[in-house]
Image (cartoon, rainbow, N blue to C red):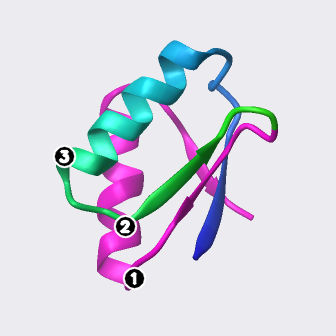
Amino acid sequence: MTKFDIKEMSCNHCVDRIHNLLAGLNINHEVDLSSKSVSIDGDEATLNQAVEELADIGFTATRK
């Protein structure tokens, strides 16, 4: 899994938005509010798609 920081994640509503987006794209992931991060399982194309889709809903995903 590749871990990304998401500084804008601040509450459970954010976690739900991120989870619902990635689940809707059938991307295996884990969202962690305490570390403001999301871990994504997939190839480079999947990771790029996730980063782009997250940006579209207002979250900047920065690879750790």
Residue closest to the eye, 53 or 29: 29
Instruction: Tell me the amino acid under the disc marked 1.
Output: Glu
On-image quarter of the N terminus: bottom right
Q: Marks 1 and 2: in contact by CB < 8 Å?
A: yes
The CA span between labels 2 and 3 is 16 Å
Q: Position of residue 10 (x, y in %)?
A: 68, 18
Give the CA separation, mark 2 to mark 1.
6 Å
Name the residue at 22% across, 60% down: 26
Callout 3–callout 1 Cβ contact below 8 Å: no
SS at mark 2 in the image:
helix
Report the residue marked by disc 1: 44
Q: Residue furthest bottom?
A: 43
Q: Residue at x 46, y 74 (%)?
A: 41
Q: Quadrant of the C terminus?
A: bottom right
Which mark is nearer the camera, 2 or 3? Answer: 3
Secondary-structure class at tag 1: helix
Residue that label 3 marks: 24
Q: Residue at x 39, y 82 (%)?
A: 44
Q: Residue under circle 2?
A: 48
Q: Earlier in the sequence, mark 2 or mark 3?
A: 3
Residue closer to the observer: 29 or 58: 29
State whether residue 26 is above or below residue 23. below
N-terminal label among 3 and 1: 3
51 vs 16: above or below? below
Rendered position, 10 above or below 64: above
Q: Amino acid at mark 2?
A: Asn
Relative horizontal placement of residue 51, taking residue 22 as reference (left or right) = right
Q: Which residues are magenta?
A: 35-64
Residue 20 position in % (x across, y down): 30, 35
